[in-house]
Amino acid sequence: MTDSPDISTTHLVLIPSYNPGPQVARTVSAARSEWNPVWVVIDGSTDGTDKLLLEMAAIDPGLRVLALARNRGKGAAVLAGLQAARQAGYTHALTMDSDGQHPAKCIRGFMAASQAAPSAMVLGDPRFDASAPALRVRGRRISNWWANLETLWLGINDSLFGFRVYPIAPLERIMGAQHWMRRFDFDVEAAVRLCWAGVPPINLPAPVRYLDAAQGGVSHFRYGRDNLLLTWMHIRLLCGFAPRLPGLIARRRHGRRSDSNSQPCKHPCKHPCKHPCKHR
C-alpha cells in the first residue's frame, strides 16, 4: 500500500460486508489508500471473504475486521461497528458498501466536510452512469419523495445512497431506541430520523458505478422483499411525522431566514469529491 494517510482519531471508514465476492479486496484497498483507519464488519459472510479480509487485516494495522457470527442485515452490521467505534473514541463514521459501487476517491472530501461541520451528516448525492439499472434509478425517486415529505424537505437529496458520514452518538442513540433500521431500511430511516433529531444534512455529489457479474458485481437487493420493507418503513415514518410537524415547520422557517442573510458561494468547486468548497 502506498501513500497511506495519517491515522485519524475521530473519523473512520466503516464497511458492512455480506458475501460481496472478491471485489471486496479492491474496495477495502481503495478505501485504505484514502483513509486510516478502515473498519470492516463481516455480517455472517459464507463466501470465504471473511478469511480474505482477516488476512488483509493481519498485515495492515490501519485495517480492522469485526466478524458477526450470523447475518443480521446491513443496519445491524453498521450498528455493531458504531458501538465498537464509539468505545474506541471515534466520533464519526463514513459508511460505504463493500461491492465496489461507492467512490473511494471521495472519502477525503466527505471527511473534510464532516470535520468542518461535525454536527452535520454528510450525504452522498449519487451521479449515475449508463451502468445504473433504470428500474433502480426510477424506484429510488419514490423513496426520495417520501423521505423529503417526512422531513418537510429539510435537505435530503438522496435517501438510499449509503456513502455517508454519520455523527456516531446521535445515530447510535436513535438505533438503540428501537429494533427497526437493521436491514435494507437502514439508510433511509437513518437520514430521516437524524433530520428529526436536528442533525442537518450536507449533500455532496458522488459518482456511482454498477458492476455486472463479469466485473465481480454482487447484489443482494430483492425487489419484492426489499420494496415491501421500504413500504412498511415509510408507513412507520409517516406515523412519526405528524407529531413532529410543528417543529419541522419551525425549522424550515428558521432556515429560510438564515438563507436570506447568507451570500451564495461565488467560487463553485469543480471537483466536489476531493475539494469541498472553502470560499463560503
Image (cartoon, helix red, strand yellow):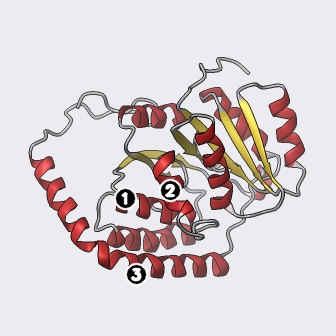
Which of the two discs, 1 and 2, sits closer to the camera? 2
Q: Pointers 3 and 1 in contact (CB under 8 A)?
A: no
Label 1 secondary element: loop
For label 1, the residue is 197
For label 3, the residue is 239
Q: In the image, what residue occupies the spot 54% across and 53% down?
A: 172
Which one is in front, 169 or 124? Answer: 169
Which one is in front, 139 or 201? Answer: 201
Label 3 secondary element: helix
- Mark 1: amino acid: Ala
- Mark 3: amino acid: Cys
Label 2 secondary element: helix
C-alpha separation, residue under disc 1 versus residue under disc 2: 10 Å
Q: Pointers 3 and 2 in contact (CB under 8 A)?
A: no
Q: Residues within 10 Å of mark 2 (few under 14, many from 20)?
A: few
Q: Quadrant of residue 249?
A: bottom left
Q: Quadrant of residue 71?
A: bottom right
C-alpha separation, residue under disc 3 versus residue under disc 1: 16 Å
For label 2, the residue is 173
Residue 143, x across and y down, in percent:
46, 72
Is residue 109 visible from the viewing direction of this image? Answer: yes
Q: In the image, what residue occupies the spot 72% across and 65% down?
A: 220
First in residue order: circle 1 vs circle 2: 2
Q: Residues within 10 Å of mark 3 (few under 14, many from 20)?
A: few
Q: Residues within 10 Å of mark 1 (few under 14, many from 20)?
A: few
C-alpha separation, residue under disc 3 versus residue under disc 2: 20 Å
Residue 171, x across and y down, in percent:
50, 54
In the rendered image, which quarter contains the N terminus? top right
